[in-house]
Amino acid sequence: MAGNTFGEIFRVTTWGESHGPALGAVIDGCPPRVSLTAADIEAELARRRPGVQAHASSRREPDKVQILSGVFENLTTGTPLSLIIYNRDVKSQDYEDLREVFRPGHGDITFQAKYGIRDHRGGGRASARETVARVAAGAVAQKILDRENIRVLAYTLELGGVRAGRLEEDRIWDNPFFCPDPDAVPAMAARVQEVKDRRDSLGGLVEIRVRGCPAGLGEPVFDKLDAALAQAMMSVGAVKGVEIGAGFPAARMLGSEHNDPITVQGFTTNNAGGILAGISNGDEIVLRAAVKPIPSIPREQQTIDLAGQPRTITVKGRHDISAIPRIVPVLAAMVRLTLADFLLRQKALQ
Amino acid sequence: MAGNTFGEIFRVTTWGESHGPALGAVIDGCPPRVSLTAADIEAELARRRPGVQAHASSRREPDKVQILSGVFENLTTGTPLSLIIYNRDVKSQDYEDLREVFRPGHGDITFQAKYGIRDHRGGGRASARETVARVAAGAVAQKILDRENIRVLAYTLELGGVRAGRLEEDRIWDNPFFCPDPDAVPAMAARVQEVKDRRDSLGGLVEIRVRGCPAGLGEPVFDKLDAALAQAMMSVGAVKGVEIGAGFPAARMLGSEHNDPITVQGFTTNNAGGILAGISNGDEIVLRAAVKPIPSIPREQQTIDLAGQPRTITVKGRHDISAIPRIVPVLAAMVRLTLADFLLRQKALQ
Amino acid sequence: MAGNTFGEIFRVTTWGESHGPALGAVIDGCPPRVSLTAADIEAELARRRPGVQAHASSRREPDKVQILSGVFENLTTGTPLSLIIYNRDVKSQDYEDLREVFRPGHGDITFQAKYGIRDHRGGGRASARETVARVAAGAVAQKILDRENIRVLAYTLELGGVRAGRLEEDRIWDNPFFCPDPDAVPAMAARVQEVKDRRDSLGGLVEIRVRGCPAGLGEPVFDKLDAALAQAMMSVGAVKGVEIGAGFPAARMLGSEHNDPITVQGFTTNNAGGILAGISNGDEIVLRAAVKPIPSIPREQQTIDLAGQPRTITVKGRHDISAIPRIVPVLAAMVRLTLADFLLRQKALQ
Amino acid sequence: MAGNTFGEIFRVTTWGESHGPALGAVIDGCPPRVSLTAADIEAELARRRPGVQAHASSRREPDKVQILSGVFENLTTGTPLSLIIYNRDVKSQDYEDLREVFRPGHGDITFQAKYGIRDHRGGGRASARETVARVAAGAVAQKILDRENIRVLAYTLELGGVRAGRLEEDRIWDNPFFCPDPDAVPAMAARVQEVKDRRDSLGGLVEIRVRGCPAGLGEPVFDKLDAALAQAMMSVGAVKGVEIGAGFPAARMLGSEHNDPITVQGFTTNNAGGILAGISNGDEIVLRAAVKPIPSIPREQQTIDLAGQPRTITVKGRHDISAIPRIVPVLAAMVRLTLADFLLRQKALQ
């Protein structure tokens, strides 16, 4: 109801603020006898950690996770998993002057409107730091997907207008932009530096491909698999658009172009993006998310304060130039959480 | 769980197949003492009725609704509303040859994979006919929005590549494409005729604007208002992409361009599309959906049958050339259902 | 949320008022390929029909059910089942004088307090007529239980203080009190006649036994199987108490008496009532519900009206002397709905 | 779904095992700007702490709570509250011999049947230790109830057959049995000592009264307020029966006796127990729970092991003689959680 829980059977509830003592996730509904250690989760957390990229936030968090419940002798027991990640490198004083001023492009003004109170330090619950709990939970979800050999591949398709021209899977993690096209990396780096010098920020596109997803996942009508994935991805802070398969360009295609012919060997094209009528068709699931530029920029901007008076603000603190690439593992996590839940939902039908 | 329910407090459960005796919706959680008659609902149903547009399906349904419960002397009582719409003009024999063959671009093959059984007649539950129950429920949701003077404006932004150049609100309903730009109507008509002559089908873009939405709606983290709207719109059959505010083009903007400055008079721009950090900011909410071309085309297509053998198919039956404009009131309904639910969720906080 | 839905995976939503045109249930989450016909449901409806017992309400309803969706060629399809039962024998004028007066022991006064409006005719949504939809849905749930050979046995343990001394299963349905002890039937009949002559009403106890339930159903902590069953039974209008296994007398037992020793052949006693720590243990599940006397009595009673003024009332209309035996199939239905849901929940774990 | 979450709007998810590092609760949906400190919670935790009663478990836990999120400057912010209570006095070696043997009357055998794995140490998730998180959450719920001046009074009505003869509210907490009748305390003490000497255990009855509850709470049909309370109380480990108002004895009353006449001053009697047709009527809510004797007894009992072989067992470890009185604050907490949720649900209607 209050929106901090995701999933129906594999249910994740997250909690925690940017400058509180810790953040965490409780996972209820994880099947028993799944092998799980903190290391399984930390490997994924490492990918969203600030500071691994040259242009990223200078906040340093080791992002160690502790599993407080639900695991006995390295196997899940079917009872709730409680995951906790402590905040270490908190510099709340950086935010003291934000107590009464709303940063443009941030949730400061809407949290105040909604609740009449807010933890202004680092964005509180609206901080990107919140996503650490999603990534931790997503790593557990992947354990469920592993049982069915489902893989989720996520990467930067475009950054600041520089587009990856091809997909080399094994090159994604070897560059600071999680870009699958090694040839695009230098241009991305140049674009980032240029914008950093201008004290501005960048957006881009993330693409996600799910391989090995069996046909039959997804619930028709409101809980279509693509609808659930759209919610999952749009629930990540900076995402302004989501598309599947042919996506927005499908609006200008003809039916004879867009329909994917069916053969004994499978679909000859994949404009559907792996989902038909809300149910996976066994083909690769292909999604893209549009990521807006990060709103925290070290420039003077026009705003108002709590009293409704005009103010100017220059956002300090440690900020990335772009939500990309750190958003890449976050979006992958959301896709994993969605699929794990729908896998279990499908089991209940049988 | 099985996905035929939408909403948390204002909860709508729909049922019914294209060629069954009836379709309907049960609404649980509608507040008491809201004035409601069948006529309130039928006015909205009329807008999605097949046959009102020149190029639309020739199936004729009067779409009268009966309110079977939850209303006493024209006021809601707080108990569940049961709405029923009977199917009249059913020609199931048109579909007999689809019993064993999967239509490309349709859910035939995925329903079979999921359930091991399907009602093949007219697409069964996967038919666009299903949306009649959504529109009926959406009309009830609008009654809740009326109490707060919230208006939902939906229209065709683009059809077959022909784009509306301006928004004249009072002209939307006076043309067969629900196009807000009278000057674009002839080009749309020509485009539709051209594609109809080629026995093909078209897609397009629908834009939705919500006016009067108070700041504070939306639940941070997973149930962000934009995430819920994305699910709502993507849950409608033909939608392949959803964006909010600046949308996909935001991926190529700079932070200094994208951030909406805040002034005493409000936001000077609306790249956010009325939602910040998942919570409405009081500005106009602006969304767009990409609609794929209708998959039913009277041309020979390649497919397989239940036994996995190759087949060709030429889809007969009565079909639209485009899901637009009939999808326009359906998307409006989904936005209404979402907002009514979030309004009530917000009340619970206080 | 508004409470007209029961279950998590096998989800039933009911609607309808005593004097509206119809009542019904929508079942979402029924697995596909379950054989189902109206006759399957009507057999169970017949058991709660008014008028089958000598002392019962003289309202006559044929209680035919129509399945409006979700079944194709006598098999469920996995899409929502919509069941509808029309009201025929409605005499609303009997209730006109209740428009402004609250009947003692009824929900009139609380519905008014909650909603500020109510359908006073026959109790509206608070009428026992509402349970017809539960029984219909329960008959579908039994189809799921049949797949696992789970049987639900329900009967009158006590009526007006007259207790059944033994359980003869095949005699339950051959007497008008659903009493499993043929020797107790004449005393029950005499007790009912005596109270009827005094223009008063009676309560009693219903016992339910579930046979063949596998070990492992039930979710620890809040959704314990016994907790869910307690909610299920207490949600039926006249029930004032629920107990499992040894029940209230367990409060005076010693641990050494109450613990059921475990042997290779199973438990030697069943004080647990088939559920340990909220999870079924494979033994017979044994529950009892306390049923209050029907509040509608043809005697003058003291009350107030809508304006808060003192009034006297003599309830007219057609009423039973006791909720027993008609409540017996209703309680059985609630147990069936609970078990079907927990069976499917357990599948999702695997 | 997996049952570790309670409530719809005020939603509590608990986690943790008896011998894990910690237990906790996440509360999502707590309204903003409620004053809250750890001390508010610890006051309530102190009442269920082992070791405060002469006859209680010798395990010593300080039960300090830490609020990890959702509170800013001693006010709730509307974001999730994460409460954590560390386990300190853990003696897992006491339980090593229970790894392969099922204790009679415990969930050992059913957890094994359900999950195929279990944390045997101290009962794992099935331990009464789990309830510490409920009590912590219940203390937060009381803060919501405080805003409406709703009080929850819970006490021991009967212990080992010794019944409290009257209710002196201010004496409840001044004796080790939470007994509201000072004259019954010596007999309770004698009964406890007698049973302790016999190395056996005791059950009893707990009564709960809610004062100040406004009329109108509760959702008709499945989520009746009494049904929800029944689930809430039956979800506590040792509870075998629940009744409201007149309860089981109502089964032997006549309608003319049971109906509570309504006057301008209110109801003249309260057989309903404050709830009519599932909705609170403004009168005192009166509930009772039957508590079974604690199954852990230091006597030889017959059982089987993991391999299905016969075994005898003498349960060691530190155990109470009775779940009473420590269950008293737990049941109060469950009632608080239920009422806080229904209060917020009612707001959403308006």
Image: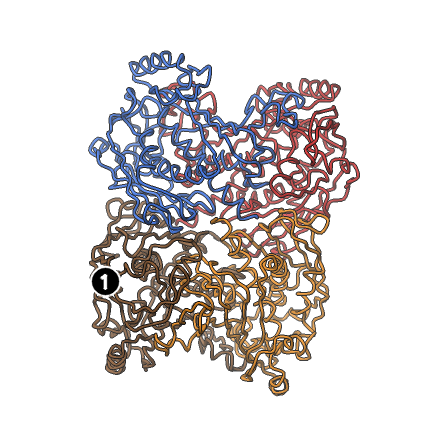
Chain colours: A orange, B brown, C blue, D red
The residue nearer to you, when weighing C27 against D177, is C27
Q: Can you give x and y, in whole percent of width and height, for residue C209 in the image? A: 48, 27
Give the residue type at disc 1.
Answer: Ala
Q: Can you give x and y, in whole percent of width and height, for residue D237 in the image? A: 61, 34
Report in which chain the residue with disc 1 lies.
Answer: B
Question: Residue A327, located in which quarter of the rendered image?
Answer: bottom right
Q: Is residue D172 left or right of residue B267?
A: right
Q: How many marks?
A: 1
According to the picture, the residue beneath numbered tag 1 turns out to be B46
Question: Residue A263, located in which quarter of the rendered image?
Answer: bottom left
Q: Can you give x and y, in whole percent of width and height, for residue A33 in the image? A: 65, 49
The residue nearer to you, when weighing B210 against D299, is D299
Give the answer, above or below, for where A11 lies relative to A128: above
The residue nearer to you, when weighing A150 against D65, is A150
The answer to whether residue D145 shows anywhere in this view is: yes
Give the answer, above or below, for where B33 lies relative to B57: above
Q: Residues within 10 Å of mark 1 (few under 14, many from 20)?
A: some
- Residue at image position (41%, 34%) is C333
Question: Residue B202, located in which quarter of the rendered image?
Answer: bottom left
The answer to whether residue C128 shows anywhere in this view is: no
Q: Is residue A274 left or right of residue D161?
A: left
Q: Is residue D90 left or right of residue D10?
A: right
- Residue at image position (51%, 71%) is A239
Q: Secondary structure at mark 1?
A: helix
- Residue at image position (44%, 38%) is C337
Q: Is residue B136 left or right of residue A309?
A: left
Q: Can you give x and y, in whole percent of width and height, for residue B42 in the image? A: 23, 58
